[in-house]
């Protein structure tokens, strides 16, 4: 009798686990159907990168490349900065494993240096001209590597609440669990995606705080694409890899050869303004720190005009940074 009960409980447990994992897969498939690729693809080593592009109606002022941070894709930066950059050629990329870009080298692509190389492979093919690079949050790690390794390609670097330095406390435990081999994919489908599906709005509120979430942000930013299990796991892998990477890269920031503007909010509880933005602005020879009062982790939504001003000054007749 007891063995039958145990067997029944095991069957119920297995069915429940299978049901949750199938539900996670369904959530991801729903998001993919709702937000299909809207841009173009460029071939790079190991696969393709997805990007969206806009060009000025007349003579343009140059090219601006937008690279998104964690838990998002190209649509976040493009939605708020794209309309303000009508005088520029704008290229908004999906980092490897996000949006509709392939993960390319699989788990190894969590390394920001590999991401930097892949992004530049794509940009060398579609935008051989020099450009201003704009990077938000976690993309700061790859963007600064691009600036260090390929300075001849940049007219300037604009960092938005960007990760550039090691920080106390490390990362949340679940990012490690999601990143583990074998266990990671199971944890992602069993815990990560189901939890994230219920926390998308709360997550948006936390990154925008203390301000309100931009109306329509989740839809305009196509944030639900994060619910695809492979994307969710790639996101945690990238976060887990960032700490050691920036720790090793910090001594190189004094070698940055282009104007660097680090824009952040004084209320950013996600990426410390002092540990990251203020620090790299001090280290970069042409660095400037811009602190926005009452703004959290989304300065490009709170003050897009400040971001545009920084870009304009980098491509204008004078390269000096006169931001107040």
Image: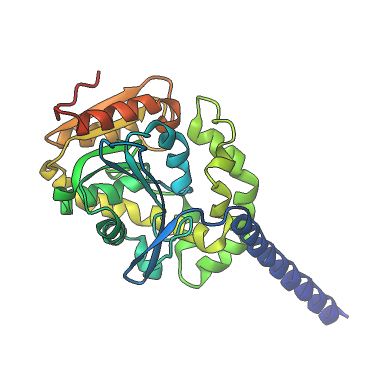
| Residue 256 drawn above or below residue 114 | above
> Which residue appears at 22% of the width and 37% of the height?
280
Q: Nearer the viewer, residue 17 or 292?
A: 292
> Which residue appears at 54% of the width and 30% of the height?
214
Q: Nearer the viewer, residue 242 or 136?
A: 136
Q: Residue furthest front?
A: 58
Q: Is residue 160 visible?
A: yes
Q: Nearer the viewer, residue 202 or 181?
A: 202
Residue 289's image quarter? Answer: top left
Q: Horizontally, is 111 left or right of 298 in the view?
A: left
> Which residue appears at 26% of the width and 35% of the height?
61
State which quarter of the image contains the N terminus: bottom right
Residue 159's image quarter? Answer: top left
> Which residue appears at 15% of the width and 48% of the height?
151
Q: Is residue 269 visible?
A: no
| Residue 121 drawn above or below residue 163 | below
Q: Nearer the viewer, residue 245 or 77?
A: 77
Q: Residue furthest right?
A: 1
Q: Position of residue 236 (x, y in %)?
A: 45, 56
Q: Horizontally, is 312 left or right of 201 in the view?
A: left
Q: Position of residue 181 (x, y in %)?
A: 46, 71
Q: Position of residue 80 (x, y in %)?
A: 45, 34
């Amino acid at each position: 009798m007891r063995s039958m009960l145990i067997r029944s409980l095991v069957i119920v447990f297995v069915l429940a686990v299978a049901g949750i994992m199938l539900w996670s897969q369904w959530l991801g498939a729903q998001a993919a159907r709702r937000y299909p690729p809207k841009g173009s693809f460029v071939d790079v080593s190991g696969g393709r990168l997805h990007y969206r592009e806009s060009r000025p109606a007349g003579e343009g002022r140059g090219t601006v490349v937008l690279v998104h941070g964690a838990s998002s894709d190209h649509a976040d930066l493009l939605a708020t900065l794209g309309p303000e950059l009508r005088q520029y050629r704008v290229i908004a990329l999906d980092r490897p494993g996000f949006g509709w870009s392939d993960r390319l080298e699989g788990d190894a692509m969590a390394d920001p240096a590999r991401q930097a190389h892949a992004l530049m492979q794509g940009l060398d093919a579609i935008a051989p001209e020099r450009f201003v690079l704009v990077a938000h949050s976690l993309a700061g790690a790859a963007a600064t590597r691009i600036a260090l390794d390929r300075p001849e390609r940049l007219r300037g670097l604009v960092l938005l609440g960007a990760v550039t330095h090691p920080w106390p406390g490390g990362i949340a435990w679940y990012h490690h669990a999601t990143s583990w081999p074998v266990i990671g994919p199971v944890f992602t489908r069993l815990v990560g995606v189901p939890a994230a599906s219920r926390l998308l709005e709360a997550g948006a509120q936390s990154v925008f705080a203390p301000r309100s979430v931009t109306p329509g942000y989740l839809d305009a930013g196509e944030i639900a694409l994060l619910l695809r299990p492979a994307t969710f796991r790639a996101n945690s892998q990238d976060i887990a890899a960032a700490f050691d990477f920036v720790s090793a890269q910090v001594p190189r920031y004094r070698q940055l050869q282009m104007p660097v503007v680090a824009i952040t909010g004084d209320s950013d509880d996600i990426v410390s303004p002092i540990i990251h933005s203020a620090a790299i602005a001090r280290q970069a020879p042409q660095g400037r720190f811009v602190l926005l009062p009452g703004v959290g982790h989304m300065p490009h939504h709170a003050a897009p005009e400040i971001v545009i001003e920084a870009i304009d000054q980098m491509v204008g007749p004078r390269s000096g940074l006169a931001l107040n």
